[in-house]
Image: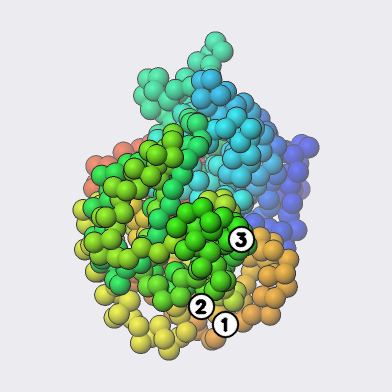
């Protein structure tokens, strides 16, 4: 019996797939990678106990294990780097374990999507104290916790994790032997934090608990247009002390002109309809109704744009907060009706953003800096694109930015768009009409090599500036970025928790290479 057949036999009734078309689908993410391998099989557990069985079987057969959630990685977060590897499809672990509206937590399996979390909390009037990704209709809880979310991990109260030896452990108050419940993270050393942002290299997260809060009953929105990235970044610095701003998104000229026509098309139409029906109520609604007459072109002429949401317990409190914000935004920009942030609220999640309007391939490169450096970062990234404009134009590569900020950080996320053949990962996630329309797309010769090289140059420029990142995967230069003592600590943890090096090897920028 071959090693693969022996491994599958050891799994018992746990479903495993070795068909090449399926293993290829599960082994690829949204980008493309040199040295990429296809998994020998894909295993589909439904419980933490089954994950533990898989891990023990893998150890016995020398099989590397890569854990995959919704598959929305674009930094090689789960692609195998060797032949003898299995991918665990975590989406079968999708139970909502418990909602406690009094102690204010929700516990779910890590294969749940963020849309499931929202749906489970909605009847209670609650939301998670966590910033889920826009792709939350497909992205899973475990994927986001492994890859990290900027400014959003403090709401995680506890984890259930399968260790490399197959033991199942819990963290925080959830680990208490007598009726443990995940109501607080702080009980002894913060073991929860150990497994956050680890890219699955220290353990396989099978369940997670989040702090939840009452959904704010009142929200107000604002949108502002700016002439330059510097102006928008400087405004973000000035807004950073105001923690009551619940959502803060900055868009470049390309994104400002396309996002309403791609990710939020249906939601924009719905918001415009509401605005038209209510235009006798407020000046803001009247202005939105006027803009609605231009359909999805309501942001024509807008270059850089920033979109804000303030929420609070009362309409007056929300409006008072926005009254503080607006004069700051208006110093460098001009206000226009906030159709887009209203649409963002209405749509919740959108997977369509991972392609351009006409099916162009997409990839992002994110970097996080102290908020005080926002203007410096804006200048440097704009210079990068000016320096590369001629070559990008010749290859037909377009760039855009999404920017965000919190009280301490500034995130810049330049994205590339280019014409290319799509993959089965795209087709299975797209609406059927888009999948059919885009199946015949092709790319110019050499376009992938160019985009790869350009993206690596951008990564390296951000590295030299001292950036940190989420979604480290196998892309960002994590090892090089750390001082020697801290890197040794991370490697020591990996040695302790995964001594055979079989959990997601090659990730976290090869925090430790495979054992000989």
Which residue lies at the image location 45% right of the left edge and 58% below the top edge?
283
Which picture quadrant has residue 416? bottom left
Q: Quadrant of residue 19?
A: bottom right
Measured in 3D between alpha carbons, the distance from the residue under mark 1 to the one under mark 2, in whole angstroms, is 8 Å
| Residue density around tag 1, few if under 14, some if 14–19, many if 20 or more, within 10 Å | some
Residue 175 x/y as whole percent:
50, 20
CA–CA distance between discs 2 and 3? 33 Å
Task: Check the image and tell me how it is coloured.
Answer: rainbow
Q: Is residue 100 above or below residue 134?
A: above
Residue 194 in sight from this viewpoint: no
> For the residue labelled by badge 3, is the local secondary structure a helix, a strand or a loop?
helix
Circles 1 and 2: CB atoms closer than 8 Å = yes
Q: Which residue is mark 2?
A: 418
* Residue at the (61%, 82%) spot, across then down: 442
Residue topped by disc 3: 273
Query: Which of the marked residues, 1 or 3, is nearer the chain's N terminus?
Result: 3
Q: Secondary structure at mark 2?
A: strand
Q: Looking at the picture, how far across and down is residue 303, in whole percent?
A: 37, 73
């Amino acid at each position: 019996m071959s090693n693969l057949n022996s491994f599958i036999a050891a799994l018992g009734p746990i479903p495993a797939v070795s068909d090449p078309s399926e293993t290829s689908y599960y082994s690829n993410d949204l980008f493309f990678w040199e040295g990429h391998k296809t998994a020998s099989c894909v295993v589909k557990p439904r419980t933490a106990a089954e994950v533990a069985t898989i891990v023990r079987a893998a150890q016995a057969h020398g099989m590397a294990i890569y854990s995959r959630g919704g598959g929305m990685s674009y930094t090689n977060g789960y692609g195998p780097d060797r032949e003898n590897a299995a991918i665990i499809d975590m989406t079968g672990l999708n139970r909502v374990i418990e909602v406690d509206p009094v102690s204010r937590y929700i516990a779910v399996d890590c294969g749940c999507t963020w849309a499931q979390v929202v749906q489970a909390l909605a009847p209670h009037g609650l939301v998670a104290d966590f910033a889920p990704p826009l792709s939350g209709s497909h992205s899973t809880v475990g994927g986001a916790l492994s890859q990290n979310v900027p400014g959003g991990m403090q709401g995680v109260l506890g984890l259930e994790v399968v260790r490399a030896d197959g033991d199942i452990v819990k963290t925080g108050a959830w680990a208490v032997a007598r009726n443990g419940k995940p109501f607080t993270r702080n009980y002894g050393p913060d073991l929860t934090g150990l497994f956050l942002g680890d890219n699955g290299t220290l353990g396989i997260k099978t369940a997670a608990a989040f702090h939840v809060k009452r959904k704010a009953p009142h929200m107000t929105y604002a949108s502002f247009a700016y002439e330059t990235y510097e102006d928008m970044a400087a405004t973000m610095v000035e807004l950073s002390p105001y923690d009551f701003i619940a959502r803060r998104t900055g868009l470049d000229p390309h994104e400002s002109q396309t996002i309403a026509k791609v990710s939020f098309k249906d939601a924009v139409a719905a918001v415009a309809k509401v605005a038209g029906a209510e235009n006798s109520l407020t000046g803001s609604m009247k202005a939105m109704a006027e803009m609605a007459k231009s359909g999805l072109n309501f942001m024509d002429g807008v270059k850089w744009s920033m979109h804000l949401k303030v929420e609070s317990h009362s309409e007056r409190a929300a409006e008072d907060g926005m009254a503080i914000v607006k004069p700051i935004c208006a110093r460098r920009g001009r206000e226009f009706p906030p159709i887009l942030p209203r649409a963002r609220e209405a749509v919740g999640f959108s997977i369509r953003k991972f392609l351009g309007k006409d099916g162009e391939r997409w990839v992002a490169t994110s970097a996080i800096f102290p908020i005080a450096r926002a203007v410096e970062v804006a200048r440097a990234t704009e210079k990068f694109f000016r320096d590369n404009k001629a070559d990008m134009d010749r290859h037909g590569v377009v760039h855009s930015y999404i920017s965000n900020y919190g009280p301490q950080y500034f995130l810049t996320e330049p994205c590339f768009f280019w014409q290319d053949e799509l993959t089965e990962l795209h087709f299975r996630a797209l609406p059927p009409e888009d999948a059919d329309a885009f199946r015949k797309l092709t790319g110019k010769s050499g376009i992938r090599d160019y985009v790869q090289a350009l993206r690596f140059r951008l990564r390296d420029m951000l590295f030299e500036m001292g950036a940190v990142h989420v979604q480290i995967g196998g892309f960002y230069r994590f090892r090089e970025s750390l001082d020697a003592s801290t890197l040794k600590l991370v490697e020591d943890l990996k040695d302790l928790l995964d001594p055979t090096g079989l959990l997601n090897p090659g990730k976290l920028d090869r925090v430790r290479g495979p054992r000989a």
